[in-house]
Amino acid sequence: MNIDTNKNIDSEIAELKKKLELLENYKKNVERNSSLTIEDNLKTIDGIIRNKKLAIMKNKYSKTVPLSSYYDHELVAHLEATYNILCALNNSINGNNR
């Protein structure tokens, strides 16, 4: 084999190593993202709703920003509706009739 052939082989090996590294990183990202289940995401949304409701109930707001309570009431209403829809969709997909 001549020097040009060796250079071509070396460059192809280097390219394949780069592609392998990219594919391994992609696989890690897919595995990391697939480890979060729909139930985990629903629990996160439920936790946010509970925290906001608790803040509203305890009236933990600064007197300098009176609109923040109003915005949290609006946020909770929208989050609850979204959460309920997502739960219903998840249950219908999984065949659960809770």
Image (cartoon, grey):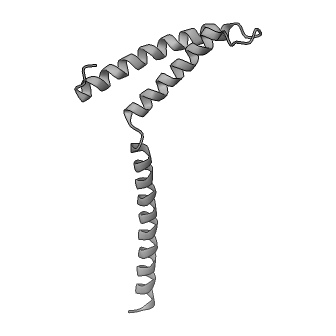
Q: Position of residue 71 (x, y in %)?
A: 60, 11
* Quarter-of-image position of residue 36: top left
What x and y, as percent, mark residue 24?
42, 60
95 or 15, nearer to the observer: 95
Q: Residue at x 28, y 24 (%)?
A: 91
Quarter of the image containing the C terminus? Answer: top left
42 sits to left or right of 67: left
**Whole-percent x and y of residue 86?**
36, 22
Q: Residue 13 is drawn in which quadrant?
A: bottom left
Number of marks in picture: 0
Q: Position of residue 76 (x, y in %)?
A: 52, 13
Which residue is most to the left? Answer: 95
> Is 93 rendered above or below residue 33?
above
Query: Which residue appears farthest toward the right when viewing the image?
Result: 64
Residue occupying the point 54% across, 9% down: 74
Is residue 90 found left or right of 67 in the rendered image? left
Q: Is residue 69 left or right of residue 80?
A: right
Residue 95 higher or lower than 73, as above or below: below
The residue at 59%/12% (across/down) is: 72
Identify which residue is drawn at 70% across, 7% down. 66
Asked if residue 29 is positioned above or below residue 10 in the image, the reply reads above
Quadrant where the image shows the N terminus: bottom left
